[in-house]
Amino acid sequence: MQGKIVKGIAGFYYVDVAESGIYECRARGIFRKEKQKPLVGDNVEIQVLDEKEREGNLVKIFPRTSQLIRPAAANVDQALVIFAVRQPDPNLDLLDRFLVAMEQQRVPAVICFNKSDLEEEGQAERLRRIYEGCGYRVLAVSAKEEQGIGQIREILEGKTTVVAGPSGVGKSSITKLLQQEISMETGEISRKLGRGKHTTRHAQLIRIGSHTYLMDTPGFSSLTVGGMEKEELRQYFPEFLPYEGSCRFQGCVHIHEPGCAVKAALEDGKVDAGRYASYVSFFEELKEKEKRRY
């Protein structure tokens, strides 16, 4: 029997099997021996031990198309990063950190600005211009007024999408709206666990359609940029890519060098000043980490 791991906690893996429901499974010792850890999002084969109690063993993990480090997950097709237009005002430094993390892990990101019903003076349009100028798909929606939810649904169709964003931006409201047309036996997971302990600290997949899953992650308020050399950072700002190779010096990191094509584009308004400020800030952060390392 084949399914997808939708949650893993305390040595148990909860596997969603189409048309059958969720099975609570243990991983066979062979995975430990081969140092292979099952991840949320893994497509697996299970051996059913008790059909009535929906219990089984994981016997095989199918090859992964992708693997995320933060959060630890497999077979993620894209990220939906949700911030609010207002209440709270968007922390663009945090948004840029998340986008760098997704670029680093080669996961395409879609940016969703919620609470567009609260916007003033074209805030949503200004944010859209900034991030569409960087090559990202940007949506402005209102969970409260149920506007733009159909657009999100189209983008998610047939994919596994990691959903992330800080607390208070309406992530859960959007997720509930997307779930309206399908009931998944998440209650079964809760009953087996016996209590809601740990649920906010672990990634979980929520099925919202046939072969369509959302991976909910805990709200985050900080995110460090790491796992790279400072010279690599420029690769993760897609708006810089058209200018690579046009700077006076090979290997230009677009900070202090003369004849820098990115800084020229910044002066011409072709690169957003706020995004460039994020880049410089992250570069300095990596530089400091490098100093401490040596």
Image (spheres, grey):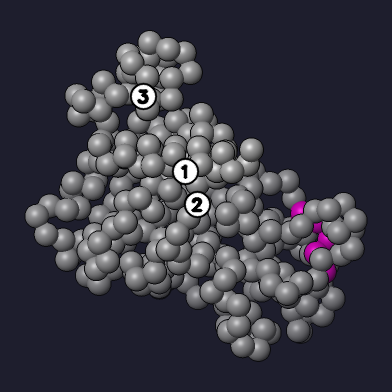
Quadrant in which residue 190 is drawn: bottom right
- Left or right: residue 94 compared with residue 201: left
Looking at the rendered structure, which numbered label has been put on residue 285?
Answer: 1
- The quarter of the image holding the N terminus is bottom right
Would you call the spot at circle 2 few (<14 residues within 10 Å), some (14-19), or many (20 or more)?
few
Which is more N-terminal, label 2 or label 3? 2
Give the label, 1 or 2, closer to the camera: 1
Query: Which residues fall within the magenta stretch?
Result: 57-61
Q: Residue tagged by mark 2?
A: 224
- Left or right: residue 59 compared with residue 202: right
Residue at 73% in and 46% down = 63
Which amino acid does the dot numbered 1 rest on? Answer: Glu
Q: What element carries label 2?
A: loop
Residue at 68% in and 84% down = 192
Residue 29 percent across, percent down from the top left: 89, 63
Residue 141 percent across, percent down from the top left: 26, 59
Q: Is residue 122 visible?
A: yes
Q: What element carries label 1?
A: helix
Quadrant in which residue 72 is drawn: bottom right
